[in-house]
Image: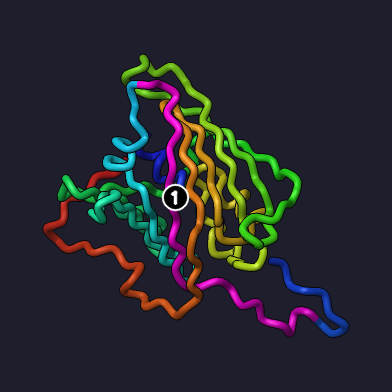
Amino acid sequence: MKRLILLIFSITLLSPSDYNSSLEKTKYFEGQVIYNIEYTPYNKNFSPDRIKEMVGSKMILTFKKGNYKKEYFSPNGELLQERILNLKDHKSYMSTKDSDTIFWIDITKNTSKTTFEVLKDSTILNHPCTIIKTKSAVSLKNHNEEPFEIEGIFKYAKDLPVNPDWYVNYKEGNFNEIIKSGKGIAIETINKGVYWKQQIKAVSIIERKVKKSEVKIQINNKTPLQEL
């Protein structure tokens, strides 16, 4: 499930011209996006407010050249979790507020059975978007390894482009293939999980220069690490 969470979680074309388009350099997105997160539980035993306290009601994405940091905050502003993608290390890291251990996955290994399809383009929050639907089969230990199908809808902004070549080695969850169609920052994501539906929607987009230190994982020789 942790591997899926790491997965769940984020992804235009050069304008035609009368001259050689290869001479034109695409300006890829760099900056921060702030999202609000809402939950719709499938069972009345789960309270949306309680889920926000445990999982987060706000996410801040800091993005630079394909690397990123995602910070999840509770309604009272407490940092609950960080997820950092380091393309050079070929790893996606996750840390939580209640553990000193940093968990990680090898993004070059595809262990998630994920398929996807490109849906009809749409305009979201005044951004033209490519819409992609994914399906992933996961097994949960407390459900006797019975597989569940997790569905996601990702809405990638064409005017906030990213370079698919950055992710050529990101094979986990078929992300290297998905981003070839997405080619942008996801400004809205809908995850239909086992216990609730999660909607992550951008409320603020800030294009700015990002320092490398802002998307760097803080690890030293004493940091406990655990592969998922």
User: In the figure, 41 relative to 155: above or below?
Assistant: above
User: In the figure, 163 relative to 174: above or below?
Assistant: below
Residue 24 visible: yes
Q: In the image, what residue type sits under mark 1?
A: Ile
Is 36 covered by the magenta stretch? yes
Write the residue at 75% across / 46% down. 120
Question: What residue range appears in magenta?
Answer: 21-44
Camera-side residue of 118 and 174: 118
Camera-side residue of 90 and 178: 178
Write the residue at 82% across / 82% down. 20
Is 215 covered by the magenta stretch? no
Q: Which residue is mark 1?
A: 107
Residue 115 image offset from top left, x and y in percent: 61, 36
Residue 158 image offset from top left, x and y in percent: 67, 63
Estimate how packed mark 1 is, as few (under 14), some (14 to 19) or many (20 or more) residues with alpha carbons within 10 Å: many
Residue 209 image offset from top left, x and y in percent: 44, 80
Residue 196 image offset from top left, x and y in percent: 43, 30
Q: Is residue 202 left or right of residue 14?
A: left
